[in-house]
């Protein structure tokens, strides 16, 4: 068991600087991998032609790096927005088709854009209910049934977004390019909405945003779309130029890390699992999920919810909380500490540990003996104390994995600021290099 072997010294990971942005920045995703770290790890632990699995792939950072380094890769995520983004970032596009599609979308939407004067006046006045309903009905616009829709968006912004989306969905183009266009559209949703774009932990119309709105906030979704397309175009072109000839295209699957099957042999796992109670991925992408049609109503959303690992407020009836609970020393100590102060937080923690134990089990069935599994983990805090995520992983995976190395590197300038008031703080990360026993 973990704890009986001598503790490993933490080694510093050398992370060379690199200027290429590739497709890493086309969509803002919380708690993303730092791409140069992925590159350094792939260089150190894999060879070209090998296949890497990321069972918590998020926005696909590991897949982008694998592809340009000639490694095959498979990514899995429970979140449909993550899956669409990861796919869009890793397709080997015909760049002329992308250019033509973007041009024709921009051409079609141009007459739908309001005048500069109207956008300036909309900083202080929205459409009336009647104007909103008339525009929606006359143009037969589809607007998603987001709970508390008008809390999240101004009415004129909803009309603008619906007009843009209708053009993206109806313009003739290759389906992969359409998906890229949808991701470029998804990338403007948060900034078009009333939600604060800064906190990554969830979705909030903060007092900071309310103050901005009172002072007059300029929102022109068409202008945001133009810059999103521009970014996507240069990013996908750069990615494509960096791809080796005959690079295998990454496979991206929507699935559950606790229960997945991959159709090919995997040489290594490289992943950053969700932290306990840090980012609410389910809530974070709610607006984009509705606009992209991945969830059409609240029932669809509720069906997705139980699959997310690390979320807060797990329901007492959740099946994972009904499983036998016989924790190791470290997990047991933390669960007890939390239970004394806050039983529901302790239940969330039990859920997290049980879910991650299942994910480790699944990985052990996927990897052959001797293969490596690399976990990038940050620190999370509870009541000012650091939760030792690395030690917890070591303990819960010890039947099938042994910890071989522990590397660390500082985080600089990352999209990791959790929230304007959240106490979670993650400013350094570790890489646990584990080996299948
Ligand atoms: C730390 S993020 C990964 C970020 C990723 N490395 C990147 O660069 O974008 C963790 C991911 O785990 C996903 N996740 C949560 N529960 C999951 C589950 N049961 N199965 C698969 N993925 C899950 C979340 O949706 C989130 O995308």
Image (cartoon, rainbow, N blue to C red):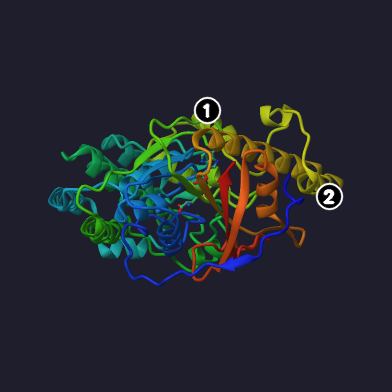
Q: Secondary structure at mark 1?
A: helix
- Percent position (x, y) of residue 433? 56, 54
- Residue assigned mark 2: 337
Residue 267, above or below 279: above
- Residue assigned mark 1: 299
Residue 392, above or below 426: above
**Ligand 1 within 8 angstroms of badge 1 C-beta:** no
Question: In the image shown, does 135 or 273 lie closer to the viewer?
Answer: 273
- The answer to whether residue 160 shows anywhere in this view is no
Category of crowding for the residue at label 2, using alpha-carbon neighbours closer than 10 angstroms: few (below 14), some (14–19), many (at least 20): few
Q: Is residue 317 left or right of residue 289?
A: right
Question: In the image shown, does 112 or 327 lie closer to the viewer?
Answer: 327
Q: Is residue 148 left or right of residue 185?
A: right
- Percent position (x, y) of residue 347? 75, 39
Q: Earlier in the sequence, mark 1 or mark 2?
A: 1
| Picture residue at 43% right of the left edge, 63% below the top | 40
| Picture residue at 33% right of the left edge, 36% below the top | 142
Question: In the image shown, does 424 or 228 lie closer to the viewer?
Answer: 424
Which marked residue is nearer to the observer: mark 1 or mark 2? Answer: 2
Could you say which disc has been placed on residue 242 in the image?
none
């Amino acid at each position: 068991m973990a704890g009986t072997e001598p503790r490993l010294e933490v080694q510093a990971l050398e992370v060379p600087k690199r200027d290429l942005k590739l497709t890493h920045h086309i969509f803002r995703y919380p708690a993303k991998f730092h791409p140069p770290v992925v590159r350094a790890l792939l260089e150190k632990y894999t060879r070209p032609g090998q296949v890497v699995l990321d069972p918590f792939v998020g926005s696909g950072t590991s897949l982008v790096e694998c592809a340009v380094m000639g490694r095959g890769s498979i990514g899995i995520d429970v979140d449909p927005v993550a899956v669409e983004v990861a796919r869009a970032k890793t397709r080997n596009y015909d760049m002329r088709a992308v250019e033509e599609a973007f041009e024709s979308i921009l051409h079609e939407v141009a007459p739908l854009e309001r005048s500069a004067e109207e956008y300036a006046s909309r900083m202080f006045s929205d459409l009336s209910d009647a104007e909103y309903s008339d525009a929606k009905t006359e143009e037969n616009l589809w607007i998603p049934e987001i709970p508390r829709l008008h809390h999240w968006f101004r009415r004129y912004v909803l009309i603008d977004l619906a007009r843009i989306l209708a053009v993206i969905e109806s313009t003739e183009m290759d389906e992969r390019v359409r998906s890229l266009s949808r991701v470029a559209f998804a990338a403007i949703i948060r900034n078009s909405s009333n939600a604060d774009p800064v906190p990554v932990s969830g979705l909030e119309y903060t007092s900071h945003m309310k103050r901005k709105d009172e002072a007059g906030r300029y929102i022109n979704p068409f202008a945001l779309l133009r810059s999103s397309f521009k970014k996507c175009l240069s990013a996908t072109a750069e990615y494509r130029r960096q791809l080796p000839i005959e690079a295998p295209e990454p496979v991206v699957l929507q699935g559950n890390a606790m229960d997945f099957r991959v159709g090919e042999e995997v040489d290594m796992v490289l992943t950053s699992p969700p932290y306990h109670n840090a980012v609410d991925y389910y809530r974070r992408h709610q607006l984009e999920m509705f606009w992209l049609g991945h969830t059409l109503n609240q029932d669809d959303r509720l069906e997705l919810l139980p699959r997310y690992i690390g979320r807060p407020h797990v329901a007492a009836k959740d099946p994972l909380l009904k499983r036998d609970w016989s924790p190791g020393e470290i997990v047991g100590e933390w669960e007890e500490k939390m239970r004394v102060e806050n039983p529901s937080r302790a239940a969330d923690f039990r859920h997290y540990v049980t879910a991650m134990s299942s994910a480790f089990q699944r990985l052990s069935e996927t990897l052959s003996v001797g293969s490596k599994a690399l976990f990038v983990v940050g620190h999370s805090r509870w009541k000012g104390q650091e939760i030792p995520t690395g030690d917890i992983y070591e303990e819960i995976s010890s039947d099938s994995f042994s910890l071989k190395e522990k590397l660390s590197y500082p985080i600089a300038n990352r999209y990791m600021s959790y929230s304007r008031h959240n106490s979670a703080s993650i400013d350094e990360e570790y890489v646990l290099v584990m080996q299948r026993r």
